[in-house]
Image (tube, rainbow, N blue to C red):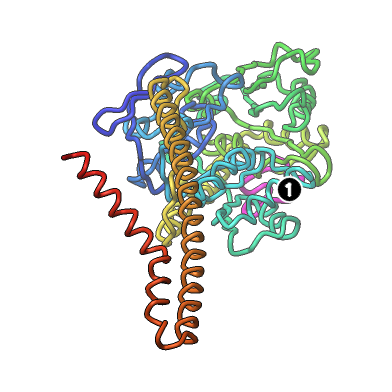
Amino acid sequence: MNVSDGIVAVQSMDTGKMHSYPPHEYCDLLIIDEMLPCDFSPFRSLEYSHYLGYFGSSLLLSTEGWHGAFSNLSFEDQLSESALPEAIKRKIRPFSQFSAIVPKLAYLTFLHNAWQMFPYLVDRQIPFVLQLYPGGRFEIGNEESDNHLRTIVESPLCRKVIVTQNLSRDYLLDRIGCDPAKIQFIYGGVYDTNNGFDFLRDKKFYGKSKDTLDMCFVAHRYGDDTKKKGYDQFVAVAKVLAQRFPDLRFHVVGDYTPDQISLEGVADRFVFHGKRPASFFKEFYPSMDIILSANRPSSEGVGAFDGFPTGACMEAGFWGVLNCISDPLKMNVAFTDDVDVVFVDLDAARTADRLAELLEHTDRLYRLAYENWHKFIQVFDANRQMWDRCRLITEQLLKTEALIIRPAPRMSSMDTSLLAGYKEEVRQLTANYKDAEMRHDNLLAEYRQLASGFLSLQSENARLAADNASLTTTLADAPALGRAELLMLRLAQSRPAMFLRKSVIQIKQHFGKSA
């Protein structure tokens, strides 16, 4: 680490590259996230890049949580390859810079991210806003999740909690006991509704611009669970529909593989696309007719849950794909079955029958898809979603708060010269202390000697006073004629007289030798 002209140059542990940052950097808004600058989370890219552009005094610190699951690139390489604008990239830093940043307000999304950062925020007394999306280790009826959530929302540093589902809001109130004044309900999420797609112009229709009917399943898989997101239901429905519609194709996007569930008899109708970045869907979704999402919680009313609609379903809807989705936790607050969405359940045969009616009458399929697209744009409008969030953040930033104190930075273990200087200073201070302690002991001995002499003088003065009193008594009792002689005798025998005689003798001897 080098410091020059007020700039700190930090060497990356991954690549050895040097990066320059101000030693004390103040900002209004500090976003802490585990995904950016990785582009595999489009809603975060959209929301956070908007904040970094809208709030001039803002920064984002990345904990680099993409390793293993999405990318193995270093922070520097991930930032370089990101499609974010350069002005936004310059505001994204590695989390190792946290101690050098002095923010007024922090912003975090997902419970697990907030819990990971909570000790750092408490240590620095940084107030924060939590956006509590479903997922991210927020689980209904889970004791550990409840304890983490309760600790966070009860902290005076937690100023607001944004919830996007009625279930989340009610759970905070009824189970966690959160202060209602802290909760802000903003239905939906931040997704790109301004994607330039026009249904009548850009949608690909069966029999006109393509020769296949296309149904898709899009989700991230958690562990080995193929049921939570509804992949098992998708396969079961596909096996029924494949027999009736030879032009129907089934597309799977995410970390699912052909060997997880038997595809006997329909394997040649399946296309596995694997994990894909956000840029993939611009060409993919306009060709899709239906997205099927029969997701469900781990068990009835307990465990992790998805939002309604899921993020993948919302994005598909913005590109004109008809949502055929389940709502087991009754979180729908805006849509009507068979008007602007199609509701399904966990009965694969019944679901297959409903979808078959649409596939047989594609004019009705595309009419519903159009209404779905139009309603999604209206309800989840990105401008309204961002406005509601920016207004909340601005209200918090305008509040008067005490200054956040930046703790002294930890010294680098590599800076041995500075460490040696500190050691020498400690050695000198220790030596000075010991010298002062020795001087104190010497002064104490001198004081005790003086005190002893003072006591001796006090005793001598007392004896002289007694002699004087005795002499006075003797003179008072003596006859008048002998009083003068007696007085002269007493004076001659007194200590002053004896001292005077001794001094005269010494003077005579001295001058006698000199002669």
Using the image, determine if residue 60 lies above or below residue 382.
above
Q: Which residues are magenta?
A: 324-342
Residue 455 shows in the view: yes
Using the image, determine if residue 373 lies above or below residue 41.
below
At which x and y percent is residue 71?
54, 19
In the rendered structure, the answer to whether residue 269 lies left or right of residue 40 reads: right
Q: Which residue appears at 47% of the width and 69% of the height?
A: 464
Dominant SS in magenta = loop
Q: Which residue is more in the foreground, 492 or 271?
A: 492
Residue 200 shows in the view: no
Q: Identity of the amino acid at label 1?
A: Asn
Which image quadrant for residue 34? top right
Q: Which residue appears at 41% of the width and 40% of the height?
A: 101
At which x and y percent is residue 357?
72, 36
Which image quadrant for residue 88? top left
Residue at which label 1 appears: 147
Q: Which residue appears at 75% of the width and 48% of the height?
A: 329
At which x and y percent is residue 119?
59, 42
Asked whether 334 falls inside the magenta stretch, the response is: yes
